[in-house]
Structures are given as C-alpha cells and as structure tokens.
Image (spheres, grey):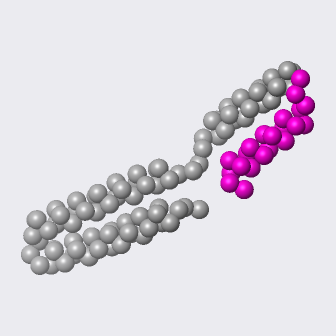
Amino acid sequence: MSSPLVSGIRITSGLVFLASIAGLIVSSINGNNEGWVLTIGMASAITAVVLIVTSAVASTKRNPAFVDADAEVVEARVRDLVDAGADEESVRELVRLSLKLGRGA
C-alpha cells in the first residue's frame, strides 16, 4: 500500500498527462504553435521523470537474494549467541519480536 503522498503524486501525474494530451490537440488545431507544443511536451516529460523517480523510491520490494543473505547473517548470529551460552528459545523469541517491531505490527 502506498502512502498518501505517493498516491497524490501519481494522481497529479495522471492529470498532467491528460491535460498534456488535450493541450497538444488544442495547440495543433490552433495553428501548431511550436512554443506551446514544446512547453506542453516538456511538462509531460518532466512529469514522467517525476513519476518514475517516485515509483522507484517508494518501491518496497527487496531482492530475494538480499533477504536470504540477511537471514543467513541473523541465523549465524543466533548460533553464535547460543554457542556462547544463551538460551536458544529466548534468542529466537527476541528475533521474532524484533521482526514484528520492524514490520510495524
């Protein structure tokens, strides 16, 4: 689920794209003024870049290879703590609570 800011940027971008299409049609009908066409085209191009950057920054997907590597590191640390004398069930419960806290649950 995306944040309200990201949703607002996406909706605004869609509106700018629709307005750009209408603007290009109107400027074409009214004499094909190059200044208007370039201005409208640049506005839609800048909006496209903003939308791409917003989507890239707001993406929450992680590469599975990194997730597996992180899991291996955590498991190695759990083993180290258990080997040092910590209770394995307590350490694993701490990891579960940490994950729950990290997910905001």
Asked if 47 appears above or below 86 in the picture, the reply is: below
Looking at this view, name the residue that lies furthest to the top: 84
Depth order, front residue of 9/90: 90
Q: Is residue 50 above or below residue 64?
A: below
Quarter of the rendering containing residue 65: top right
Q: Is residue 6 left or right of residue 92?
A: left
Q: Quadrant of the N terminus?
A: bottom right
Depth order, front residue of 56/82: 82
Q: Position of residue 86 (x, y in %)?
A: 88, 28
Image coordinates of residue 8 in percent, x first then y, are 44, 67
Residue at image x 15%, y 78%?
29
Q: Residue at x 11, y 65 (%)?
A: 35
Image location (x, y in percent) of residue 84: 85, 21
Q: Quadrant of residue 52?
A: bottom left
Main SS, magenta residues: helix
Q: Residue at x 40, y 51 (%)?
A: 53
Q: Position of residue 80 (x, y in %)?
A: 80, 23
Question: Magenta region: which residues?
Answer: 85-105
Identify the residue at image location x=68%, y=34%.
70
- Within the magenta stretch, is there residue 104? yes
Q: Is residue 84 above or below residue 35?
A: above
